[in-house]
Amino acid sequence: MQAVKICIACHRIKNRYSLPYECTPGKFAGKHKMLCNLRYVKAYLWSEILYQQALKRKPTTMPNRSPDELFQLVKTLEKAEKRNFKLFMNRNAASEELKIIQLFDALDKMEIYDEELLLRKNKGIRKAQLSNLKAHLYKQILASLRVLRDDYNIDIQLHEQLDYSRILYNKGLYLQSLKVLNKIKEMAKSHNQITFWLQALFFEKKIESLHITRSFEDRAGQLAKEVDELDDRLVMVGKLSNLALQLYGWYIKVGHARNEAEENAVKVFFEKNLPEDAASYPGFYEKLYLYQSYAWYGFILQDFLQYYKSCQRWVDLFTKEPFMRKVETQQYIKGMHNLLNAHFMLLNRDKFAETLHQFENFYKSKEANINENNRVQTFVYLYLAKINRHFMEGTFSQGLKMVPEIEEKLEEHALQLDRHRVLVFYYKIACLYFGSGDNEKTIDFLNRIIHWKVDLRVDLQCYARLLHLIAHYELGNYDILEHLIKSVYRFMSKMKNLSVVEMEIFSFLRKSFHLDPRQLRSDFIVLRDKLKKYEENPLESRSFMYLDIISWLDSRIRDMPVQEVIRERFLGGK
């Protein structure tokens, strides 16, 4: 690609991005004006800047996920599970089983799955048999994990009892099988496990219809009544869980409602799909999914009071039935996360601190560390809450101390983390750097979002670009700002994410190039006063949730870091 010659006014850009451009000696001059032909190649220059940035930093795609499922499974095993697998396999010393152990050890030692290297280092394994060995090893690992007793997993315990009941039935021991089924029903009822309860009832109906057990009189009528009641509850759970899931899916893809049309669409969908008698059902799961539905509904519409009330009820369910925290740990973790988020949105400082302390204690508990899934989710939501605390208190620089640990954890849990959570972390870390005044690092983390082609959280992608634009403005990269403004404007317009607030910001940035530096302060004041009028309008103030524009404007007006403006406000509100 032919190099573009640019004037000395571009020297700052050249150094900032280590671009391979040269100036023509003695031909150009001027510190702030572009006197060369750069104005004709702005788009080319900017594309080169992005390309060079991409070469310099780490890849911005998801952390590398090996496509090999067996390798993924092996890498998730803990020391005790690996030891158990070896004991499980050594019960059979057949030659094929020895090859399985050899393959397991080879995969365990590998950092990245490489089939050629695997075969080269393990001569006893032929390529023709590798596929079958891998399939067999996968099944054996799952079988070894299955025999490990998991007292924290009620699903596995109930499945085990159902298996025992089936074995006894096949042996012709009908009464013993029924006895096990009664035990299953009691356990399922006490743990709100409707589906297992129903499975036990259906199996019991089968036994009673095929064999004369004389276990109870009028058993047919009782069984029919129990099945009808549970079936009705299961239908309600299905409807409410569908509603909660669809609303959450809408938020993950789009974010908050961006205009009246989307707001009305969400309201119509919610009212149409919410069963009229949903609130009359007393069961745990009926209430759980009902509260979740109202939580997502309020969150999408930016009705944060509704969001808070629903999240509090969600968490209160686990307070009323504490044993369910063991059964549905993931739902409890998600509920705590949303309750913390609601306190953050409403600036309930004392409640936020109290709930965060409670969640930090849970993070250290046995329940939170019983398996990898719980550990990962607790880490994600706890550290997002900790970052929010620094946003709330204006201690951005202090929050940056967590960044190395967060990046290490993101790498460690790359297999388990979904793209949405990683995007959120990148954006929040970028905001920490922006608030602390490090615009260079802000741009680095925002580029990870901008160059990552994912079809979710359109809102986050839009505001990442807007913050990216402001960070360049703060750095004084005026030579590329005109192109950036057009690019970000087009993107946000295409994504239907432009409100009056963003329009005012774009308008200000366009004309700020031509303003006298002495006039800028008064223009910042005018812009701040304009935007403050929209703070109470949910559809126009979405920007304030993603980026504290008002605090940034105050920082420019008062010539002080953003974090100091927020810190001063926080201390004044105590």
Image (cartoon, helix red, strand yellow):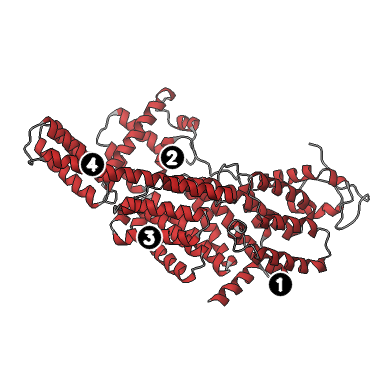
Badge 3 or badge 4: first in the primary sequence: 4
Q: As shown in the figure, which amino acid type bears the numbered disc 3? A: Arg
One can see residue 346 in this view: yes
**Which residue carries the number 1 mark?**
558
Tag 1 and tag 3, C-beta contact below 8 Å: no
**Which residue carries the number 2 mark?**
72
Q: How far apart are marks 1 and 2 (CA)?
A: 53 Å
Q: What element carries label 4?
A: helix
Q: Mark on residue 313?
A: 3
**Which residue carries the number 4 mark?**
228
Q: Distance between the residues labelled 1 and 4?
A: 69 Å
Badge 1 or badge 3: first in the primary sequence: 3
Could you say where residue 535 lies in the image, as x and y percent from the top left? 61, 63
**2 vs 4, front mark:** 4
Q: As shown in the figure, which amino acid type bears the numbered disc 2? A: Gln
- Does 162 sit left or right of 238 as displayed? left
